[in-house]
Amino acid sequence: QSILTQPPSVSAAPGQKVSISCSGSSSNIGIKYVSWYQKLPGTAPRLLIYGDNKRPSGIPDRFSGSKSGTSATLEITGLQTGDEADYYCGAWDITLSDGVYGAGVFGGGTRVTVL
Amino acid sequence: EVQLLESGGGLVQPGGSLRLSCGVSGFTFGSDAMTWVRQAPGKGLEWVASIDESGSYRHYADSVKGRFSISRDNSRDTLSLQMHSLRVEDTAFYYCVKGGIGRAPGIDPWGQGTLVTVSS
Protein backbone atom coordinates (compact mmCIF):
# COMPACT_ATOMS: atom_id res chain seq x y z
CA GLN A 1 0.00 0.00 0.00
CA SER A 2 1.52 3.31 -1.15
CA ILE A 3 1.68 6.31 1.18
CA LEU A 4 0.41 8.43 -1.70
CA THR A 5 -2.93 7.26 -3.09
CA GLN A 6 -3.79 7.45 -6.78
CA PRO A 7 -6.71 5.95 -8.71
CA PRO A 8 -5.60 2.80 -10.58
CA SER A 9 -6.94 4.02 -13.90
CA VAL A 10 -8.66 6.85 -15.74
CA SER A 11 -9.82 7.07 -19.33
CA ALA A 12 -11.25 9.52 -21.83
CA ALA A 13 -11.68 10.02 -25.54
CA PRO A 14 -9.09 11.82 -27.66
CA GLY A 15 -9.27 15.57 -27.17
CA GLN A 16 -10.90 15.27 -23.77
CA LYS A 17 -9.45 15.95 -20.33
CA VAL A 18 -8.40 13.60 -17.54
CA SER A 19 -7.54 14.43 -13.96
CA ILE A 20 -5.40 12.23 -11.76
CA SER A 21 -5.54 12.74 -8.01
CA CYS A 22 -2.77 12.06 -5.54
CA SER A 23 -3.79 11.99 -1.90
CA GLY A 24 -1.21 12.23 0.86
CA SER A 25 -0.90 13.66 4.35
CA SER A 26 0.55 16.46 6.41
CA SER A 27 3.91 14.65 6.51
CA ASN A 28 4.39 14.65 2.74
CA ILE A 29 2.22 16.54 0.25
CA GLY A 30 1.00 18.93 2.94
CA ILE A 31 4.48 20.38 3.46
CA LYS A 32 6.66 19.16 0.58
CA TYR A 33 6.76 19.65 -3.17
CA VAL A 34 4.92 17.23 -5.43
CA SER A 35 6.28 16.05 -8.76
CA TRP A 36 4.67 13.97 -11.48
CA TYR A 37 6.23 11.37 -13.80
CA GLN A 38 5.13 9.66 -16.98
CA LYS A 39 6.17 6.05 -17.60
CA LEU A 40 5.76 4.59 -21.06
CA PRO A 41 6.37 0.84 -21.58
CA GLY A 42 10.00 0.06 -22.24
CA THR A 43 11.25 3.56 -21.53
CA ALA A 44 12.60 5.37 -18.51
CA PRO A 45 10.19 7.62 -16.62
CA ARG A 46 10.24 11.32 -17.41
CA LEU A 47 9.43 14.33 -15.30
CA LEU A 48 6.21 16.11 -16.22
CA ILE A 49 5.62 18.47 -13.29
CA TYR A 50 7.90 19.66 -10.47
CA GLY A 51 7.48 22.05 -7.57
CA ASP A 52 3.74 21.24 -7.46
CA ASN A 53 2.83 23.05 -10.69
CA LYS A 54 5.87 23.80 -12.87
CA ARG A 55 6.64 22.24 -16.23
CA PRO A 56 10.18 21.42 -17.35
CA SER A 57 11.14 22.74 -20.75
CA GLY A 58 9.79 20.54 -23.50
CA ILE A 59 6.68 19.42 -21.64
CA PRO A 60 3.52 20.58 -23.44
CA ASP A 61 1.19 22.93 -21.60
CA ARG A 62 -1.51 20.28 -21.97
CA PHE A 63 -0.01 18.91 -18.75
CA SER A 64 -0.65 20.90 -15.59
CA GLY A 65 -0.32 20.32 -11.87
CA SER A 66 -1.97 21.76 -8.81
CA LYS A 67 -1.99 21.19 -5.08
CA SER A 68 -4.40 21.92 -2.28
CA GLY A 69 -3.71 20.91 1.29
CA THR A 70 -2.65 17.27 1.33
CA SER A 71 -3.75 16.44 -2.21
CA ALA A 72 -2.35 17.11 -5.65
CA THR A 73 -3.81 16.78 -9.13
CA LEU A 74 -2.36 16.24 -12.59
CA GLU A 75 -4.54 17.34 -15.49
CA ILE A 76 -4.03 16.36 -19.09
CA THR A 77 -6.08 18.30 -21.62
CA GLY A 78 -6.46 17.65 -25.34
CA LEU A 79 -5.79 13.95 -24.71
CA GLN A 80 -3.74 12.20 -27.40
CA THR A 81 -3.09 8.52 -28.06
CA GLY A 82 0.55 9.12 -27.20
CA ASP A 83 -0.51 10.05 -23.67
CA GLU A 84 -1.43 6.44 -22.90
CA ALA A 85 0.96 5.64 -20.10
CA ASP A 86 1.32 5.21 -16.36
CA TYR A 87 1.52 8.37 -14.29
CA TYR A 88 3.06 8.66 -10.84
CA CYS A 89 3.09 11.38 -8.22
CA GLY A 90 6.10 11.67 -5.94
CA ALA A 91 7.04 13.58 -2.83
CA TRP A 92 9.23 13.53 0.27
CA ASP A 93 7.82 12.25 3.54
CA ILE A 94 9.28 13.58 6.77
CA THR A 95 8.15 10.72 9.01
CA LEU A 96 10.75 9.38 11.42
CA SER A 97 11.72 5.78 10.76
CA ASP A 98 14.50 3.90 12.52
CA GLY A 99 15.94 7.14 13.84
CA VAL A 100 16.13 8.82 10.44
CA TYR A 101 13.79 11.50 9.21
CA GLY A 102 12.66 11.40 5.64
CA ALA A 103 12.13 9.12 2.70
CA GLY A 104 10.91 9.48 -0.83
CA VAL A 105 7.46 8.20 -1.72
CA PHE A 106 5.58 7.53 -4.93
CA GLY A 107 1.91 6.97 -5.54
CA GLY A 108 0.84 3.57 -6.80
CA GLY A 109 0.46 4.88 -10.34
CA THR A 110 -2.50 5.63 -12.61
CA ARG A 111 -2.94 4.04 -16.02
CA VAL A 112 -4.33 6.52 -18.55
CA THR A 113 -6.28 4.96 -21.40
CA VAL A 114 -7.34 6.88 -24.47
CA LEU A 115 -10.65 5.43 -25.66
CA GLU B 1 23.17 17.22 -22.36
CA VAL B 2 22.78 15.47 -19.03
CA GLN B 3 23.33 11.73 -19.29
CA LEU B 4 23.24 8.94 -16.72
CA LEU B 5 24.33 5.40 -17.45
CA GLU B 6 23.74 2.55 -15.05
CA SER B 7 25.73 -0.65 -15.03
CA GLY B 8 26.22 -3.69 -12.85
CA GLY B 9 22.84 -5.38 -13.11
CA GLY B 10 22.47 -9.08 -13.70
CA LEU B 11 21.34 -12.40 -12.29
CA VAL B 12 22.16 -13.17 -8.66
CA GLN B 13 21.01 -15.84 -6.24
CA PRO B 14 18.93 -15.02 -3.16
CA GLY B 15 21.21 -13.91 -0.37
CA GLY B 16 23.82 -12.68 -2.81
CA SER B 17 25.31 -9.25 -3.40
CA LEU B 18 25.54 -6.88 -6.32
CA ARG B 19 26.94 -3.41 -6.86
CA LEU B 20 25.28 -1.00 -9.26
CA SER B 21 27.12 2.00 -10.65
CA CYS B 22 25.91 5.11 -12.42
CA GLY B 23 28.25 7.25 -14.47
CA VAL B 24 27.09 10.77 -15.22
CA SER B 25 28.00 13.58 -17.59
CA GLY B 26 26.69 16.94 -18.65
CA PHE B 27 26.36 18.54 -15.22
CA THR B 28 28.38 19.26 -12.10
CA PHE B 29 27.84 15.99 -10.27
CA GLY B 30 28.93 17.29 -6.89
CA SER B 31 26.26 20.00 -6.96
CA ASP B 32 23.23 17.69 -7.01
CA ALA B 33 21.59 15.13 -4.79
CA MET B 34 21.13 11.74 -6.42
CA THR B 35 18.47 9.07 -6.17
CA TRP B 36 17.91 5.38 -6.99
CA VAL B 37 14.40 4.30 -8.00
CA ARG B 38 13.30 0.80 -8.97
CA GLN B 39 10.39 -0.80 -10.75
CA ALA B 40 9.63 -4.48 -10.30
CA PRO B 41 7.96 -6.33 -13.19
CA GLY B 42 4.32 -5.31 -13.38
CA LYS B 43 4.63 -3.01 -10.37
CA GLY B 44 4.87 0.73 -9.80
CA LEU B 45 7.82 2.98 -9.14
CA GLU B 46 9.51 2.55 -5.77
CA TRP B 47 11.91 5.10 -4.32
CA VAL B 48 14.96 3.19 -3.03
CA ALA B 49 17.56 5.61 -1.69
CA SER B 50 18.96 9.09 -1.99
CA ILE B 51 22.18 10.87 -1.11
CA ASP B 52 22.92 14.56 -0.75
CA GLU B 53 25.54 16.49 -2.70
CA SER B 54 28.41 15.81 -0.33
CA GLY B 55 27.46 12.27 0.59
CA SER B 56 26.86 13.23 4.20
CA TYR B 57 23.14 12.44 4.30
CA ARG B 58 21.70 9.17 3.05
CA HIS B 59 18.12 7.97 3.18
CA TYR B 60 16.69 4.54 2.46
CA ALA B 61 13.32 2.92 1.89
CA ASP B 62 12.31 0.63 4.76
CA SER B 63 12.32 -2.29 2.32
CA VAL B 64 16.09 -1.99 1.73
CA LYS B 65 17.32 -0.43 4.98
CA GLY B 66 20.24 -2.35 6.45
CA ARG B 67 20.85 -4.26 3.20
CA PHE B 68 21.55 -1.53 0.61
CA SER B 69 24.08 1.28 0.79
CA ILE B 70 24.16 4.33 -1.46
CA SER B 71 27.41 6.18 -2.03
CA ARG B 72 29.02 8.63 -4.40
CA ASP B 73 32.47 9.58 -5.65
CA ASN B 74 32.36 13.21 -6.69
CA SER B 75 35.90 13.02 -8.07
CA ARG B 76 34.81 10.33 -10.53
CA ASP B 77 31.24 11.53 -11.19
CA THR B 78 29.93 8.16 -10.07
CA LEU B 79 26.96 7.06 -7.97
CA SER B 80 26.81 3.55 -6.52
CA LEU B 81 24.31 1.24 -4.87
CA GLN B 82 25.76 -1.69 -2.95
CA MET B 83 23.14 -4.38 -2.44
CA HIS B 84 23.52 -7.25 0.05
CA SER B 85 21.24 -10.06 1.23
CA LEU B 86 19.27 -9.80 -1.98
CA ARG B 87 15.75 -11.19 -2.05
CA VAL B 88 13.53 -12.36 -4.88
CA GLU B 89 11.40 -9.24 -4.31
CA ASP B 90 14.41 -7.02 -5.12
CA THR B 91 14.09 -8.10 -8.76
CA ALA B 92 13.51 -4.89 -10.70
CA PHE B 93 14.85 -2.34 -13.10
CA TYR B 94 16.99 0.08 -11.11
CA TYR B 95 17.16 3.68 -12.28
CA CYS B 96 19.75 6.27 -11.40
CA VAL B 97 18.18 9.74 -11.25
CA LYS B 98 19.55 13.24 -10.82
CA GLY B 99 18.14 15.20 -7.91
CA GLY B 100 16.15 14.62 -4.76
CA ILE B 101 12.45 13.87 -4.97
CA GLY B 102 11.51 16.33 -2.26
CA ARG B 103 13.31 19.22 -3.84
CA ALA B 104 11.73 21.77 -6.11
CA PRO B 105 13.24 20.51 -9.37
CA GLY B 106 12.02 16.96 -8.77
CA ILE B 107 14.16 14.09 -10.00
CA ASP B 108 15.21 14.26 -13.62
CA PRO B 109 16.61 13.03 -15.91
CA TRP B 110 16.59 9.28 -15.43
CA GLY B 111 19.08 6.74 -16.68
CA GLN B 112 17.89 3.96 -18.96
CA GLY B 113 17.88 1.49 -16.08
CA THR B 114 19.69 -1.73 -15.29
CA LEU B 115 17.90 -5.00 -14.59
CA VAL B 116 18.58 -6.90 -11.40
CA THR B 117 17.18 -10.42 -11.27
CA VAL B 118 17.29 -12.33 -7.99
CA SER B 119 16.55 -15.97 -8.59
CA SER B 120 17.88 -19.42 -7.82
Image (tube, coloured by chain):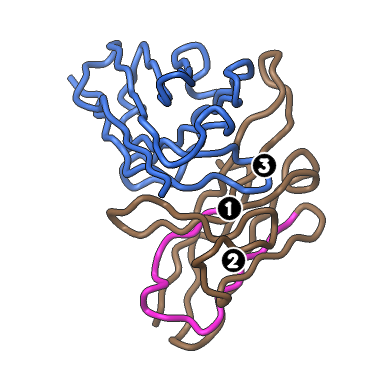
Q: In this view, does A8 lie above or below B67?
A: below
Q: How crowded is mark 2: few (under 14 residues within 10 Å), some or many (20 or more)?
A: many
- The residue to which callout 3 is attached is B103
Out of B4 and A39, give the one closest to the viewer: B4
Residue B112: percent from left, percent from top = 32, 44
Residue A60 sits inside the magenta stretch: no
Say whether disc 2 or disc 1 marks the residue closer to the N-terminus.
2
User: Can you tell which quarter of the image residue B37 is in?
Assistant: top left
Q: Residue A89 carries which label?
A: 1
- The residue to which callout 2 is attached is A20
Out of B11 and A7, give the one closest to the viewer: B11
Which residue is pictured at 42% across the width and 81% down the height? A80
User: Can you tell which quarter of the image residue B102 is in?
Assistant: top right
What amino acid type is highlighted by mark number 2? Ile
Residue A67: percent from left, percent from top = 75, 60
Q: Element under label 3? A: loop
Mark in the foreground, 1 or 3:
3
Q: What stretch is highlighted in magenta?
A: A71-88
What amino acid type is highlighted by mark number 1? Cys
Which residue is pictured at 46% across the width and 39% down the height? B97
Q: How far apart are marks 1 and 3 (CA)?
A: 14 Å
| Chain designation of label 2 | A
Q: Element under label 2? A: strand
Residue B31: percent from left, percent from top = 59, 31
